[in-house]
Amino acid sequence: MHIKEAAKRLGISARAIRFYEEKGLIAPGKELSSGYRSFTEQEIWRLRTIVALRESGMSVSGIQAALEQVERGEHDELLHYLELQRSVLYARMLETRQTLQTTDHMIGLLQGSRGLPLEDFYRLAQDSREVRELRNWEDRWNFDELASSHDERVWSGDSAYPGYREALERTVEEINPAPGETGLDLGTGTGNLAGLFMERGAVMNGVDQSKEMLRICRSKFPGMTAKIGNFLAVPYTDGQFDFVVTSFAFHHLSGRQQKLALNEMARVLKPQGRIAIAGFINRNADGGASADKHRTNSPTGALDFLDWFGPNGFESKCLKLSPELYLAAARRGLP
DNA sequence: ATTCTCACA
DNA sequence: TGTGAGTA
């Protein structure tokens, strides 16, 4: 089959097919006499995959890497690419939704006032941009960096920190899950906290940005759903969870990112849901990404984000577990 | 009808 | 990440 028919069957331009060839995604044979490209059904199938991945937003170079790995039989690599792609799409959706909200808000302002409320517009636009910039945090989506972020977090494994296990157990006590309740563990790592909740009969979901962590987590806890994602774009729809927990992860965020993360936690929480945050609690002036340097021994450090709960309809408290470890717990009242 | 290259957004 | 024009 020649290029035009192939293009027609795939619903893309012939030019695009040549482009994919130029980028090394396909290598169709050429007819000796004419020099025309000749496409086999195999190649059409491959092109279909390319088109599908492209439609989901994956870059051409990403598709190239994915296809190479599939050829080597490493299917979980492709699975990882798709999961990653999903989380990127989800983040994009949340951003779109926020833009929509801002626009609605502006429409409301316009309808409610005679003149142009320029100052309000300006403030709204600023807020909106700020949130977008926070979400667009470093490029942790870069495949190469996933490994190093894994290393950064490896200390949170079983043996590493004194008080680690106690902090997790106290978190479970605070949430006090009823059997059958649905929970979300953000920055779940290898699923240690989620595992404790499952022992209590909770149905657990976990989110982590490291595929290595998720792989270990899945093998440790087959009954748990684990997704790639992060605090600022939690890959779940609204109002799903009875409780959201996180341990030894929140301090990686800057203060403003923590606020955004709390918004996300509240978003996926059911009306009377609970939140528990355990670990180091930093008092982090904004801008500093690595919060570990700013660990504080002062419980007032926790108040920086505990202040968020009250105005958002939560009853909250903060417990000091050890000189360095804290547990913030919150419960949302009736709406 | 198709290929290739170059410029362009 | 593609597209369009011009060419052979």
Image (cartoon, coloured by chain):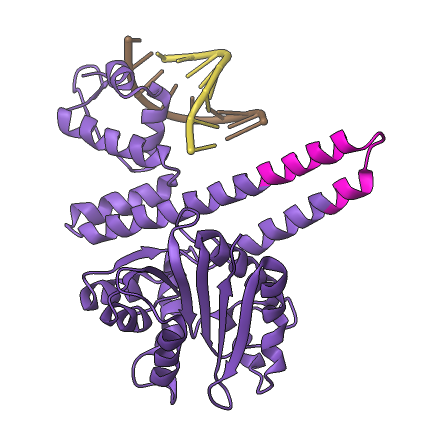
Chain colours: A purple, B brown, C yellow
- Residue closest to the far front: A334
Q: Position of residue A92 (x, y in %)?
A: 48, 43
Q: Is residue A285 above or below residue A298?
A: above
Residue sitting at 30 percent across and 86 percent down?
A159
Quadrant hosting residue A260 = bottom right
Residue sitting at 24 percent across and 60 percent down?
A224
Q: Is residue A113 above or below residue A299?
A: above
In the displayed structure image, the side of residue A93 where residue A301 appears, left or right: right
Q: Is residue A108 above or below residue A72?
A: above
Q: Is residue A199 above or below residue A15?
A: below
- Residue closest to the far right: A115
Q: Position of residue A297 (x, y in %)?
A: 57, 87
In the displayed structure image, the side of residue A208 where residue A3 appears, left or right: left
> Between residues A250 and C4, which one lies in front from this camera angle?
A250
In the displayed structure image, the side of residue A53 where residue A268 appears, left or right: right
Q: Position of residue A208 (x, y in %)?
A: 36, 62
Tell me, yes or no, whether the highlighted magenta stretch contains residue A102. yes
Quadrant hosting residue A190 = bottom left
Query: Is residue A233 at least partly visible in the picture?
Result: yes
Q: Position of residue A269 (x, y in %)?
A: 44, 55
Residue sitting at 18 percent across and 16 percent down?
A1
Quadrant hosting residue A157 = bottom left
Magenta stretch, residue numbers: A99-123
In the displayed structure image, the side of residue A4 where residue A299 appears, left or right: right
> Between residues A56 and A120, which one lies in front from this camera angle?
A120
Tell me, yes or no, whether the highlighted magenta stretch contains residue A285. no
Query: Is residue A155 at least partly visible in the picture?
Result: no
Q: Main secondary structure of the magenta part?
A: helix
Number of numbered callouts drawn = 0
Residue sitting at 37 percent across and 22 percent down?
A15
